[in-house]
Structures are given as structure tokens and as C-alpha cells.
Image: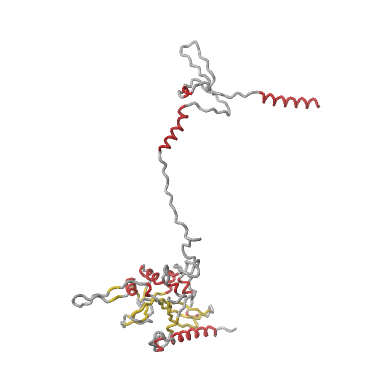
Amino acid sequence: MKQFLYLIILLFVGTEAFAQSKPVKPIVSQRPKVKPTKSTPEAVTPVPDAVAVPATEVTKPVPETVTPISTPAVATPSVNTSAVNTPVATTAAAATTPLLKKPKIKTPPKDGFFARKDVDSSVMVPYADVREEDVFYSKRIWRELDIRDTINSVLNTENSKLIEILLEAIGNEELTAYSPKDTTAGKVLEDNDAFKIALTSAEALRNARGTSEGEADEKGKIGDPVLKRLRADEFLKYRIKEDWILDVKRSIFEPRIVGLAPMKMVEGNWQPVFWIYYDEARTILSKKKLQDPSNDASVLTFDDFFVRRLFSSNIVKETNPANKTIVEILNQTDPKDPRKLYESERIKKGMADYEQSLWEY
């Protein structure tokens, strides 16, 4: 048995030694050597080995007279001059032809850590439906909001002004302006805010700009009134008409803004220029971002400013049988008389006390 194993080992070692000692001849050409024939005058020129052929003769193509013998898994470079010269010609043509570069579209850099395109809460949150039979108590109040107050100054910033938003919407016929004048009686009524007389966009813009007397000609005849230049800094006050209602179904006492009117000084008195129905303006004000001086990342809108009661104001009128304002009831002539502020605070305290009397603790 041992002799048999020794014999197998010797055969295996001898086979490996023989395989390593046998030289491997490289295949020089795929074409076999063809010996010339002496019987015919048209003898085939012997093709020498490709290694011995000089460089000048390689450029001439050799006619193929014998079918080449294919060898497995071994590939040799081709001697065809057309295949060798093709890449050189292509490279030369590519070098002479200029490359067309596509222009790069550069996007502007982001201004800051983040770039907010629009407000997040761009969808208006509607009011809850209130039925007439569910309203147990109602009180109508008129307020005046002065943008010269610090808390109200956000309505008149450089990049977002409430008056410009309203005038732009009226000019685009997205909002309807209503007249503060009683055209039937022909006199100005500051509380004529029933939204009965609609104005065109041209009439509303004319009221906002105002008119001045025309210049007199050589004969002393005064010309037609001239429109003034629109100045946003003239609208320093806004009048708000709202209803305070007690909804017994939801058990809540809340205000609902009905109308909004910008005011300007006319002949020494603050008068509304036109009235805006607030429910119609909410869709526009809810898409305009409010610039908060204390927080640049704030997403508050102009609608949030009014609905959340973020403004400061004074009451100038409440419903009364005489339909008069506080100034008319007190018969005030001095605009700095503090009695109207006392009366305003009295009305505010009266509504707060009524709300507190509704609940039991």
C-alpha cells in the first residue's frame, strides 16, 4: 500500500516539473508560413514573420490568400493600417473642432440661514357659525386704532403697510370699498358704515388721494380740482366696527370685526376715507405677512393681528339712542381732553364685568 502511495506522489511531482520546464512559445502570427511553388510562374511571395518585417513595409496591406486559422482565447494586434490610423485621425479632428460649453444657470445665493417664500398659515381660518337664536347678548362698538402707538406700528412698516395692501386690492378689484358719506342728505356722516353705497375703484382711490383747489386763470376763474399725490403717511388712524356677542350654544363671549376704515385728517378732523367689509378682506390679509420687530421668524399675518386682538385701541362710540359719539355726548372741543379716555375705559370695564357675571365659581 505504501508503495502505491509513493508511486502516485512521484507521478504528481513529475507532472508539475514537466509542465514548469516546458517553454511556452509565443504565437507571433495567425497566418501559417506558405512555401512558394516552383511549378507555376505566378508564385506566391513568401510572407516572412511579422517580427522581422521592417516598419516601412507594415504600412502596405498584404493580400489575404489563405484563410487564417483561429486560435482559442488568444488575440493578437491587427496589422491593418486603416484600423491603426483611424483613432489618430479622430483625435486630430476633435482637437481642431471647438467644444460647445453649455452656459451654467447661476441661482442667487440664499439670503440668510433659511429663505421663507411665504407665510406658513396662508389659509384663512374661518369664523365659527353663529345662529341668531343662539345670540343672547350683543353690543356694537366703534374703536380707533392709532398706528403711532408702538404696538400698532407694525401696520406701517417700510416693507408692509396696511393702507398699501388695501389700495392695491381695491385697484385690482379684489375688494369693494363703500362710501362713508350719505349721498342722499349730502353731508358727511362718520358713522355711515352700513355698506350700502359701493364705490368704484377710481372713486375709492380719488377719496384716498384727496383733491385740492384748481389754480385761477388770467380772468380769475378757478379751474377744476386737482388730485393730490397719494401719501401713505397721511393714514395714521383706522376705525374698527365690531360686535361683541354672547353665544350660548358654545358658551363664549367674543368680538367679531365687521368693518375696517382708514382715516386721514380732513379740515382738522379725522374722517374715514372708505369702509371695507372685513370678512371680504380676510382672504387677502391672511396671505400678507406681518413684520414682527421682535421676531424675524414670525409667521403672523395681518389677519392674525386683528383676529387675535394684538392691537391697542380706544373706544369712540357705542350703540346709544342718540347715535352719538363719546366726543359729541361730552360736548368736547379740546382734542386733548382726557374725559373721552375715561369714558372709553368705563365702557371696556362694563363689558368685562358683564362677562365675569355670566360665570359662577
| x and y, in percent, of residue 23 in the image | 63, 23
Name above or below for residue 253 compared with residue 57: below
Q: Nearer the viewer, residue 138 or 27?
A: 27
- Please give the count of numbered marks on the rendered protein: 0
Quadrant position of residue 140: bottom left
Name above or below for residue 286 compared with residue 318: above
Quarter of the rendering occupied by the C terminus: bottom right
- Give the residue displayed 48% in from the left and 14% down from the top: 43
Does residue 124 appear to the left or right of 200 in the view shown?
right
| x and y, in percent, of residue 143 in the image | 43, 80
Name above or below for residue 313 compared with residue 339: above
| x and y, in percent, of residue 111 in the image | 47, 60
| x and y, in percent, of residue 233 in the image | 38, 73
Quarter of the rendering occupied by the N terminus: top right
- Give the residue displayed 75% in from the left and 27% down from the top: 9
Q: Nearer the viewer, residue 357 or 146?
A: 146
Q: Nearer the viewer, residue 27 or 334?
A: 334
Residue furthest left in the image? 219
